[in-house]
């Protein structure tokens, strides 16, 4: 069985990181608590299950944010590489001072 108070603390920290759009903090929280997150199971207490549901929704939102940021970074990297290759085609650019 997992610690419900730890779940509450983690959920609050994750929610705050989402509000702040703090990608590094979200990644660190998820990495540090990965083992704990995988031990979460439904309980017989409906109130506890509601906390678990809320955490799951917060965790999914954080995962979507990380995925969206990663996709945007990939697009930016592609554009940068494409621009760099296009600029190198001009003969004077390689020897410009």
Image (cartoon, rainbow, N blue to C red):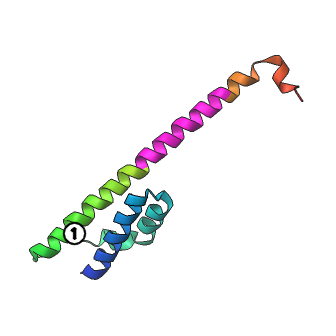
Whether residue 72 is in magenta: the answer is: yes
Percent of width and height locating residue 44: 10, 76
Query: Which secondary structure dominates the residues rendered in magenta?
Result: helix
Percent of width and height locating residue 35: 37, 72
Q: Is residue 4 above or below residue 91?
A: below
Q: Is residue 29 above or below residue 64?
A: below
Is residue 3 visible from the viewing direction of this image?
A: no
Whether residue 35 is in magenta: the answer is: no
Q: Quadrant of the C terminus?
A: top right
* Closer-to-camera residue (16/95): 16
Question: Relative to residue 21, is residue 85 drawn left or right?
Answer: right
Q: Is residue 72 above or below residue 20?
A: above
What residue occupies the far front of the structure in this picture? 20
Percent of width and height locating residue 19: 38, 59
Question: Which residue position is annotated with label 1?
Answer: 52
Is residue 4 visible from the viewing direction of this image?
A: yes
Say what secondary structure mark 1 lies in. Answer: helix
Question: Relative to residue 25, is residue 38 drawn left or right?
Answer: left
Residue 76, picture quadrant = top right
* Closer-to-camera residue (13/30): 13
Q: Which residues are magenta?
A: 67-83
Task: Assess disc 1: are there few (<14), some (14-19) or many (≥20) residues with their C-alpha within 10 Å of its C-alpha.
Answer: many
Residue in the image at 37% along x and 54% along y: 63
Residue in the image at 31% along x and 69% along y: 11
Percent of width and height locating residue 56: 26, 62
Residue in the image at 58% along x and 31% along y: 79
Question: Relative to residue 93, is residue 19 drawn left or right?
Answer: left
């Amino acid at each position: 069985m997992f610690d419900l108070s730890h779940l509450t603390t983690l959920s609050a920290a994750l929610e705050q990181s989402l509000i702040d759009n703090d990608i590094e903090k979200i990644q660190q929280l998820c990495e540090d608590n990965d083992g704990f997150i995988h031990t979460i199971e439904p309980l017989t207490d409906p109130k506890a299950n509601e906390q678990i549901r809320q955490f799951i929704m917060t965790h999914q939102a954080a995962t979507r944010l990380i995925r969206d940021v990663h996709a945007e970074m990939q697009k930016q990297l592609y554009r940068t590489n494409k621009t760099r290759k296009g600029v190198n085609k001009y003969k004077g650019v390689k020897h410009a001072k």
